């Protein structure tokens, strides 16, 4: 019986890069440069032999996004990115069906172009100098501290206390 039990994509709480448990498991977000990717990328014609001019334009634009920095390291994603280009161009048509638009959206998630896709892939878009920028480090520490503090309260910001058992 397929579909019963086991872990599923997006089920349960996602690992948080600010939690102690994730720190213990060394779960860290892969940081992508906010300025985008400036390197070389494969020609679309190697992946889609019959690519249109519009697909070529979309392909070139996508390879300047922050996500492309990771795609360049993960060559197995190139074909998925090419398929996203194909479905996105089809979805741009006024007569596009809901299924076509849905296919483009699902592929966008897979390659990290949506907020959900970034989270699912464990990617974070950050300023190029965030590792050495004191403001960024200080902001990260404040978020981490407030997360820890919230975990020790009842959710309203007040500490929980014991109540006498009424004897």
Image: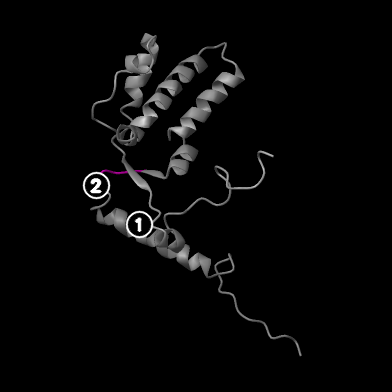
What residue is at 40 percent from the left and 60 percent from the top? 23
User: Residue at label 1?
Assistant: 139
Magenta stretch, overall SS: loop
Tell me, for residue 13, which label it has, or none.
none
Examine the image and state in which quarter residue 162 appears.
bottom right
**Residue 164: horizontal and vertical position, in percent?**
69, 86
Start-end of magenta stretch: 125-129
In this view, the residue farthest toward the bottom is 167
What residue is at 45 percent from the left and 23 percent from the top? 84
**Residue 8: horizontal and vertical position, in percent?**
58, 44
Q: Secondary structure at mark 2?
A: loop
Q: Secondary structure at mark 1?
A: helix
State the separation of the CA atoms marked 2 and 1: 14 Å
Tell me, for residue 129, which label it has, or none.
2
Please state if 164 lies on the left or on the right of 111 as rendered. Answer: right
Indicate yes or no whether the magenta region holds residue 134.
Answer: no
Closer to the eye: label 2 or 1? 2
In the rendered view, tell whether residue 130 sits above or below residue 108: below
**Residue 117: horizontal and vertical position, in percent?**
47, 37
Which quadrant holds the N terminus? top right
Q: How many residues crowd around disc 1 within 10 Å: few (fewer than 14), some, or many (20 or more)?
A: few
Q: Earlier in the sequence, mark 2 or mark 1?
A: 2
């Amino acid at each position: 019986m397929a579909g019963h039990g086991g872990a599923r994509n997006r089920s349960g709480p996602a690992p948080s890069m600010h939690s102690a448990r994730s720190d213990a498991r060394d779960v860290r977000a892969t940081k992508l440069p906010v300025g985008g990717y400036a390197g070389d990328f494969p020609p679309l014609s190697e992946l889609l032999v019959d690519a249109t001019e519009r697909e070529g334009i979309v392909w070139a634009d996508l390879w300047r996004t922050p996500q492309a920095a990771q795609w360049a390291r993960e060559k197995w994603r190139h074909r998925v990115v090419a398929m996203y280009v194909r479905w996105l161009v089809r979805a741009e048509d006024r007569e596009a069906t809901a299924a076509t638009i849905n296919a483009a959206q699902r592929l966008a998630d897979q390659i990290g172009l949506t907020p959900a896709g970034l989270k699912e892939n464990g990617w974070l878009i950050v300023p190029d100098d965030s590792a050495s920028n004191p403001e960024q480090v200080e902001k990260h520490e404040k978020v981490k501290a407030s997360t820890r503090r919230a975990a020790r309260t009842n959710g309203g910001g007040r500490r929980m206390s014991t109540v006498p058992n009424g004897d």
